[in-house]
């Protein structure tokens, strides 16, 4: 089932998610729904707060559904090490049509649970590293607009307010 993606400034986006403790059919249904929702929006990452659920769960697929092996489910994820820096363009399904360059670590190693509760570690570089950091930020209530320079942030917040006043956001 495709769920509704909430947009900034929906309060759930700014709240830290609750840890996932039950690895049951309900959770696996939510994971399936999140992939379906992400693909329908042509995204490469989606965090549970973006579908209105304040839980520490995110799905990532850099191939947007083309490569089954690229499907990643990260539950209760955390970054355990990071190195380097990259300054590249980034977007977010909760900020339609806004793209801006954001500084992120070039490489990260994460630790997370899969949908059955099993812990694993994984390395990410470049776009995958960026997706890990962007999505884990969501689970901590941090939005990419707050990773931009103050100048870019204010320009984008002004643009959003204008779109809101025109009923286009
Ligand atoms: Ni996002």
Image: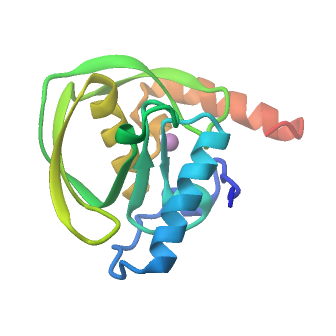
Is residue 27 toward the left or the right of residue 104 in the image?
right
x, y percentage for residue 109?
15, 42
Q: How many marks?
A: 0
* Between 98 and 23, the one nearer to me in the picture: 23
Quadrant in the rendering for residue 56: bottom left
Instruction: Work out whether residue 54 can be spotted.
Output: no
Tell me if residue 60 comes above or below residue 75 in the rendering.
above
Instruction: Work out whether residue 111 can be spotted.
Output: yes
Scheme by which the image is coloured: rainbow
* Between 165 and 26, the one nearer to me in the picture: 26
Which quadrant is home to the C terminus?
A: top right
Q: Please report the residue visible at 32 percent of the width from the left and 41 percent of the height from the top.
A: 132
Is residue 95 toward the left or the right of residue 82 in the image?
right
Is residue 40 toward the left or the right of residue 32 in the image?
right
x, y percentage for residue 116?
30, 71
Is residue 27 toward the left or the right of residue 97 in the image?
left
Q: Please report the residue visible at 67 percent of the width from the left and 34 percent of the height from the top.
A: 96
Which quadrant is home to the N terminus?
A: bottom right
Q: Please report the residue visible at 40 percent of the width from the left and 61 percent of the height from the top.
A: 57
Residue farthest to the right?
A: 166
Tell me if residue 76 comes above or below residue 99 in the rendering.
below
x, y percentage for residue 125?
22, 27
Tell me if residue 31 comes above or below residue 86 in the rendering.
below
Q: Please report the residue visible at 45 percent of the width from the left and 30 percent of the height from the top.
A: 63
x, y percentage for residue 28?
46, 69
Quadrant in the rendering for residue 11: bottom right
């Amino acid at each position: 089932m495709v769920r509704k993606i909430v947009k900034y400034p929906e309060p759930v986006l700014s709240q830290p998610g609750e840890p996932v403790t039950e690895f049951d059919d309900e959770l696996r249904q939510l994971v399936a729904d999140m992939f379906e929702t992400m693909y329908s929006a042509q995204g490469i990452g989606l965090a549970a707060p973006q579908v209105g659920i304040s839980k520490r769960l995110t799905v990532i697929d850099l191939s947007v559904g083309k490569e089954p092996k690229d499907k990643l489910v990260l539950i209760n994820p955390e970054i355990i090490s990071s190195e380097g820096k990259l300054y590249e363009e980034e977007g977010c399904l909760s900020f339609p049509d806004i793209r801006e360059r954001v500084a992120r670590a070039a490489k990260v190693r994460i630790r997370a649970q899969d949908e059955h509760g099993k812990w694993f570690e994984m390395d990410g570089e470049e776009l995958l590293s960026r997706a890990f950091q962007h999505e884990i930020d969501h689970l901590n209530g941090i939005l990419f607009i707050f990773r931009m320079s103050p100048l870019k942030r204010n320009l984008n917040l002004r643009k959003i307010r204008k779109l809101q006043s025109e009923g286009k956001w």
